[in-house]
Image: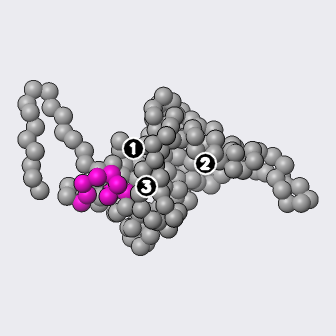
Amino acid sequence: MMKIKLCKTRLGTRVTLATAIALSGVALSGCSNNEQSTSAKGESDEVTILRFSHFLNATDNINTEGFEPWAKKIEEDSNGRLKVEIYPSSTLSEAGATYDASAKGTIDIGMQVQGYTAGRFPLTQVVELPGISNTGQQQTCILYKLYDDGIISDEYADVHLLSLMGTGQGALHTVDTPSVRQQI
């Protein structure tokens, strides 16, 4: 599994990604509808299942090299008390509705691209403007700095944010006409 060291953040001392993501995205956790019973000792007797919805297909390397090992680690680290069920290919929530599904508790964890809901995250989307960053790593550090400084945190007030990530510059594709690179 490829790991990329990014930057120090309030959400964690260091952020690592299993693989670079092709689109700016957000991993988030909403309100769970799961109920647990507890024993007299205060320990959980049941397994809490966390439903993780994302738009990538099941064979995408982000799913197989990132999400699946992460889900296994959660289960191992919790001694089996937490289990993450992964629902790829928008099976539980459509790509542009994952944030709302998480906030409403339809799913427990989701990954959504902010650009799929244009205008919903206007402060976050500033990192998509030309000339702001050259790499996904820079973009991710900018996002975390904006979040840690409270500039974009209100845009995520109805969920527990797990991660932010960026991908750097995009590209234009043409069929017959070569694109001309404009210097900024």
Nearest-to-viewer mark from 2 and 3? 3
Residue named by callout 3: 5
Q: Is residue 146 left or right of residue 97?
A: left
CA gap, disc 1 and disc 3? 14 Å
The residue at the point 21 percent across, 41 percent down is 171
Residue named by callout 2: 108
Range of residues picked out in magenta: 132-140
Label 1's element?
loop
Q: Amino acid at mark 3?
A: Lys
Residue named by callout 1: 21
CA gap, disc 1 and disc 2? 21 Å
Label 1 vs 3, first from the N-terminus: 3
Q: Amino acid at mark 1?
A: Ile
Query: In the displayed structure, would residue 66 be above or below residue 104?
Result: above
**Percent x, y for residue 117?**
38, 48
Is the Cβ of the residue at disc 2 closer than 8 Å to that at disc 3? no
Query: 157 or 169: which is nearer to us?
Result: 169
CA gap, disc 2 and disc 3? 26 Å
Is the Cβ of the residue at disc 1 closer than 8 Å to that at disc 3? no
Image-quadrant location for residue 83: top right
Image-quadrant location for residue 50: top right
Q: Point out the image quarter for the C terminus.
A: bottom left
The residue at the point 33 percent across, 57 percent down is 139
